[in-house]
Image: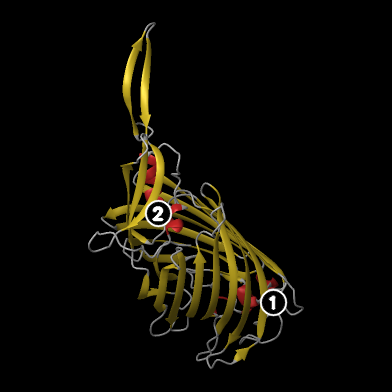
Amino acid sequence: MERGLFGMVSNAEILSGGIIRLQIAEAEVNDISIRFLDRKTGEPTKGKTKPETILRQLTTKKGQVYSMLQGKRDVDTVLTMGIMEDVSFIPQPAEDTGKVDLIMNVVERPNGGFSAGGGISSGTTSGSLPGLIGSFAYSHRNVFGRNQKLNISLERGQIDSIFRINYTDPWIEGDDKRTSRTIMVQNSRTPGNLVHGNQPVNNSLTIGRVAAGIEFSRPLRPKWSGTVGLIFQHAGARNEKGDPKIKDHYNSPLTASGKNHDDMLLAKFESVYTGSGDHGSSMFVFNMEQGLPLWPEWLFFNRVNTRARKGVEIGPALCLLSLSGGHVMGNFSPHEAFAIGGTNSVRGYEEGAVGSGRSYAVGSGEISFPVLGPVEGVFFADYGTDLGSGPSVPGDPAGARLKPGSGYGYGFGIRVDSPLGPLRLEYAFNDRHTKRFHFGVGHRN
């Protein structure tokens, strides 16, 4: 019973010498089948998901003694696929004595549909509706009945725009390591003010990127996952009229090649440790991108970026420490420099106002505590530096704008849990005696 085994002691015989002989009947799994039920009537119906797509998720196999604990874990696993509304295991006696047939009842969710929403971009800090973004998306959760995901989305803001197509197979057929595959196509336009800000009025700068690639991910060990991929990117800068630009207002170059666009083929590796998955749990991310110059004009560089977080509970309060850093070697686009400062970096500064460089380090400490219901209070302090690497970015865009290269900020705020995630309102002071409000949705990166 402690192991959750489906069985019973059917007889007990006391022998001489204090020996007891127990006869134990165990329910061996004879067969496992999938039964689809209608969402409204609960009656059996024809399902859209292929049964083998569900069966390969199960750890319960034919020939095993049926464990109710193992069956519960299998039910939870099938629910995490995201395509089922309800799942249950029903054991029934098999024709063979001592065996059991398992029927998994499943109720499928609607496969997909359209959605709309909104959000905030921290990269836009001026205008009549600074940072507001609207989104429209179509998603299909169960393409071909194999739990494959198709997402087509469009996000549009005052300056930002991202059109993205993602096609994901969460578990490649025939692979026993649970490897997933994602094919991605993306066309984006983002503000160029993080690195090349302070443009003249009515002379805004945007960075356009067209990218396509493929990524493979799989669990490496408990709480660890790894991703490798190959991505091609075509990127360049444009002015408010949409005309290509190769230099900014300060005559700093906007591309590494000196042409209207930079092309690069990126080999990507990423390893992630997620702890328990909660916001206050430990987290570590290591990311490396290598530019492959298979064509003479393609950029050759190596970029490493890492983030770590550790949470410690002190009574009802949570102390959260985080550290991030990175470095780029080689010939890279100036607008790809690490930008420091802003809502998800050093609070008290505008986005990218501390500096931009080939290297960076940002540390942050927060103490959050419950106030009332879904409301939390928080005190925080941040520090960031480009490690003296600002002048090594082509054209020294940070030096031309007199960015300090390092700075700190501190302050307080409130957070409110919502269906969109935590809503953050923070008031910060920096080391240059400037005060600034920050508003964000979701946890800090």
Q: CA distance from mark 1 to mark 2?
A: 51 Å
Residue in the image at 50% along x and 70% along y: 167
Determine which of the numbered discs, if any, sits on residue 394 in the image.
1
Check the image and name the residue furthest to the left: 41
Check the image and name the residue furthest to the right: 296
Asked if 251 appears above or below 219 in the picture, the reply is below
SS at mark 2 in the image: helix
The residue pinned by badge 2 equals 78
Residue in the image at 38% along x and 44% along y: 71
Task: Indicate the quadrant containing the N terminus: top left, top right, bottom left or bottom right.
Answer: top left
Callout 1 environment at 10 Å: few (<14), some (14 to 19), or many (20+)?
A: many
Q: Position of residue 316 (x, y in %)?
A: 34, 46
Callout 2 environment at 10 Å: few (<14), some (14 to 19), or many (20+)?
A: many
Residue in the image at 35% along x and 51% along y: 104
Viewed as shown, does residue 304 lie left or right of 30? right
Q: Position of residue 242 (x, y in %)?
A: 55, 91
Check the image and name the residue furthest to the front: 95
Q: Position of residue 265 (x, y in %)?
A: 67, 73
SS at mark 1 in the image: loop
